[in-house]
Amino acid sequence: MAAYRWEHTDAALTAQLELESEGAVGVIESGHAGVRCSNPTTGKDALVTIRTEMRRLRAGTRTVPVRSVGSAVWQVCDGEAVAHVGDKVFEITKGDLFAVPSWYEITLTARTPVELFRFSDEPVYEALGLARPIRAEQK
């Protein structure tokens, strides 16, 4: 069984944003870093049917709207943001959980630096050949 230590996750998220500041590519999008928990022996998701990942947004970052097959649950580990989920708007802060149903568009706007844990059922849809994530710039 693998252990996922916060110190390593924190270092990876920090490094991604530092490299972006230096002009290197490697973040999900500007101001938005992510680390997926993976099985060290296969490189695939740590759990066969559930994707788990940590996300970090710099203060002021607004993510590109994204829609995907499958649903996700997000937990705010630290910071404050606004989550647009479909036509709903949520003020989110440390300790909050929110769900994103299948094919609902999500956009996050960080008021402060934000740490988020996300889990989704995306590996199931990928295994079935049904995954179709769409980012706003692809529309």
Image (cartoon, helix red, strand yellow):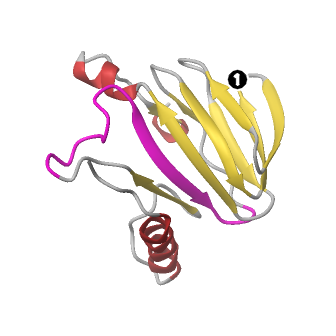
* Viewer-proximal residue among 33 and 45: 45
Name the residue rendered at 51%, 57% in the picture. Answer: 29
Residue 21 point in image, percent of width and height: 53, 80
| Disc 1: CA contacts within 10 A as few (<14), some (14-19) or many (>=20) | some
Q: Is residue 61 left or right of residue 23?
A: right
User: Quick one: 96 or 21, which is closer to the camera?
Assistant: 96
Using the image, determine if residue 93 lies above or below residue 27: above
Q: Give the camera-side residue of 41 and 35.
A: 41
Q: State the count of labels.
A: 1
State the residue at coordinates (76%, 58%): 79
Residue at 59% across, 31% down: 73
Residue 24, relative to residue 80: is it above or below? below
Secondary structure, mark 1, is loop
- Specify the farthest residue to the left: 41
User: What is the magenta range?
Assistant: 41-60
Residue found at the far bottom of this picture = 22
On screen, residue 89 versus residue 24, left or right, reads right
Locate residue 63, reporting x and y percent: 62, 49
Instruction: Give how far across and how far down residue 12 sits, in percent.
Output: 43, 69
Q: Amino acid at mark 1?
A: Gly
* Residue 53 lies in the magenta-colored region: yes
Residue at the location (76% across, 40% down)?
96
Residue position for label 1? 86
